[in-house]
Every structure is written in structure tokens, then in C-alpha cells.
Image (tube, helix red, strand yellow):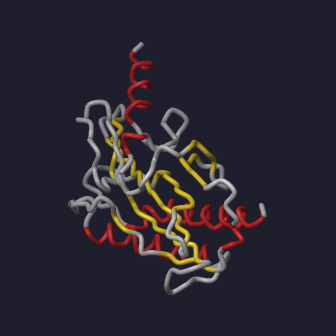
Amino acid sequence: MKSKFLLASLCAGSLVLSGCASKYVEPEQYSGFLKDYSVLKEEKSPSGAAVMRWVQPGLNGNSFTSVYLEPSQLYPQPQATEQVPQSTLQGVTQYYDQALKRELSNVLPLATTPGPGTLVVRPAITAVTASTEGLKPYEVIPIALIVAGITTATGHRDMDTTIATEAAFIDGGSGKVVAEVVRKGAGTELENSSQVMTAKDAKAVLDGWASDLGKSIRALQSQQ
């Protein structure tokens, strides 16, 4: 009986992308970065990951001849902590920009300014929420990154890292939003609450997001 209760507690408290955890960002976790969340629907990314996404019906991917990437931002603006220092926060956005540029340049030429025929990509690393058995639930924590702590039978507590992103895709000519996406991913598990997280702990997640974005644009082009 106790084991069943413990399993249920872990499923409710953890945000890692496992079988018992929610794979989608819940509405109460939306940051406010996007203008309209009501149009989002549960979808799968090219890699099979769970995402909340909307694409303008009938959007012609071949109408864009270049892509302009706005610098990724931290939204809402977070407060650095001892475990997630400012260097980590900056490193996450810097690496995300590098990954996006790498993947997007394989699909469309990178533009230096937005304009007609340009797809503007506006990405952000956003807030997450979590609660864990025995720990006080976090409310929307800007860039908490360190979320659910799972206590093992030995009393050792591992720390799961989770990051979320929201991105808007805009027609550079008209200024209209043509697509939106919200998703989250699990980073490297930290050994304990004193271990400092670094940007490299999120690299695999960021690489996956960037790769999926490039494949999504390519798929949109092939539909026409």
C-alpha cells in the first residue's frame, strides 16, 4: 500500500518526461510570452516529442525565402541563484541561439533583418512549475530549471532539471503571427541540491528543440 502511495506521489510531483509525468506544458504554466494560447493543440514534433502547437491554416512554407532569428530571451526575467547562476542562464540562451542558427541555416538562408519573404523566429526560455512529495510546491518560477526533487530509500535526493520554451513565428512582411509552439524537456539530472547547474546540462534538450524546428519548416515547405 505504501509503495503504491509513493509511486502516485512521484508521478504527481515530477515533471520529467517519463511515462507517469505530463509530457505537455500545462496552461497554468504558460508564461505570457505568446499572444494567444487558445489556438494551441496537442501535437507531436518531428522527433515524436509532445508539443503544444498552432500553425496558420493554409500557410505556404515556400513563401519564405529567408529566416530571421531574434535573440532568444529569458521570460519572465529570472533571478539567478547559487544553483542556477547568471552564467548558466546566459549560457542556455547563447547555446540555444547557436543551435537554432545551425539548424535553420540548413533550411533557409539567415537574414540580417526581418522583411518581406522572411520568417521571423522569436524564441524564449520560459517558466516551469513543479511540486514534490515532502517539498513545498513551487509556483510559477521564472527559469527555475531545477524542479522536482525525488527522495530515494536512502534519503538521497536527486534533482531533475526541466526547461520549457515558447516561440512565435512571424511573417516578416505583414508582421502577423503564423505559428506558435510551447514545449518542455528534461535536462541532466543533478546529484543533489548543492550541485550547480551549467548550460551543458541543457544542451541535449536545446539541440533537440532546434533540430525539430528545422525539420518542421522543411516539412511545411514540402506540403506545397
Residue 152 to residue 75: above or below: above
Q: Residue at x 39, y 61 (%)?
A: 125
* Residue, far front: 174
x and y percentages locating residue 114 in the rendered image: 51, 80
Nearer to me, 54 or 15: 54
Where residue 19 sits, quadrant-wise, is: top right
Q: Residue at x 46, y 47 (%)?
A: 37
Nearer to me, 81 or 74: 74
- Horizontally, is 59 left or right of 110 in the view? right
Where residue 102 sits, quadrant-wise, is: bottom right
Residue 79 to residue 153: above or below: below
x and y percentages locating residue 16 in the rendered image: 46, 43
- Horizontally, is 191 left or right of 219 in the view? left
The C terminus sits in image quarter: bottom right
x and y percentages locating residue 47 in the rendered image: 66, 54
Q: Residue at x 56, y 66 (%)?
A: 210
- Horizontally, is 183 left or right of 118 in the view? left
- Horizontally, is 119 left or right of 91 in the view? right
The count of marks equals 0
The N terminus sits in image quarter: top left
Nearer to me, 54 or 214: 54
Residue 114 to residue 137: above or below: below
x and y percentages locating residue 25 in the rendered image: 46, 44
* Residue, far top: 1
